[in-house]
Image: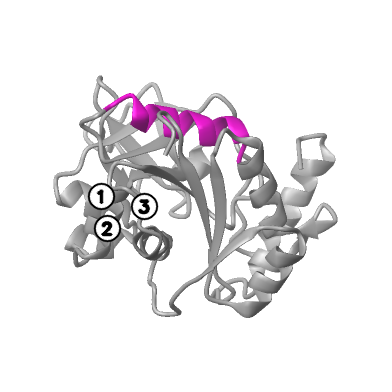
Amino acid sequence: MTAGGFRVVIPARYASTRFPGKALAILGGKPMIRHVYDQACASGALQVVIATDDSRIASVADGFGAEIAMTSVDHESGSDRIAEVARDRGWDHDDIVVNVQGDAPLISAASIDLVAALLSAHDSASLATLCAALDDPDDIHDPNIVKVVFDRAGRALYFSRSPIPAVAHTGKPPNCFWWHIGIYAYRVSALLELAQTPSCELERAEKLEQLRALHTGMEIRISVATALPGPDINTPEDLEAAERFIAKGRPA
């Protein structure tokens, strides 16, 4: 791979407990997966691949010219799906792959470039991700919005669905809570290792696979996003919120 280059893989499945078929839901006149793909193509990625286990998603993606990787139906996470692609295609262990979730149609190309550059700049890191300030009390206590704390060097310390840091002992909230934006850059070596590592108790308790990486001792670098994404799509109500987001003049 060209020095400083990276790939994007978009994991997309049809099955979803809360919103079956959401990857193909129409948003702003086109399938959600097309929004994600277009943003990835607008980034500096050298290659963009849609990884799916479903022929319906593959058919739609093929219709707009995307590169497709058909993957196992048995994967429990998007990173496992991406690891299969990296392994089958023989990507170098030092290559950088960005995981752009198929339910994040309003992620920016700038965020994709930023997370890849962040990992590239830190040889000691296995992963990189992004965050943004979070100050709405409802969001702080919303378990669907993941929070993160990190050290002064920008290394992630912990991710949680609960408010972190806790304020019970002082009654005084911190200056800022940080919302974890679910985009990741991985070194291929880390992807392959994580795919072979059993889930840990913290991961199962929080339902956050990045805790497996921290549990194994991997360094995760984190930076504040320069461009905030719109809402991820987990429910039909989220789709309506994304439509309103676009209607306000935000990029689709």
Residue sitting nearer the eye, 83 or 229 = 83
Give the magenta part as a residue range.
107-122
For the stretch drawn in magenta, the main secondary structure is helix
Local crowd at mark 2 within 10 Å, few (<14), some, or many (≥20)?
A: some
Q: Earlier in the sequence, mark 1 or mark 3?
A: 3
Residue position marked by numbered label 2 in the rendering: 192
Residue at (61, 43) in percent of width and height: 40
- The residue at which mark 3 appears reads as 91
Q: Disc 2 on helix, strand or loop? A: helix
Mark 1 → mark 3, Cα distance in angstroms = 9 Å
The spot of residue 252 in percent (x, y) is: 76, 43
Q: Are marks 1 and 2 in contact (CB under 8 Å)?
A: yes
SS class, disc 3? loop
Q: Quadrant of the N terminus?
A: top left
Q: Earlier in the sequence, mark 3 or mark 2?
A: 3
- Residue 80 % position (x, y): 36, 64
Q: Gap in Å between the C-alphas at discs 1 and 2?
A: 5 Å
Q: Is residue 235 above or below residue 119?
A: below
Residue 10: assigned label: none
Mark on residue 189?
Answer: 1
Point 23% across, 50% down: residue: 213
- Where is residue 114 shown, x and y percent of the image? 48, 29
Q: Is residue 88 above or below residue 16?
A: above
Q: Position of residue 136 (x, y in %)?
A: 53, 35
CB atoms at circles 1 and 3 under 8 Å apart? no
Residue type marked 1: Ser
For residue 111: magenta? yes
Residue 99 is inside the magenta segment:
no
Q: Amino acid at mark 3?
A: Trp
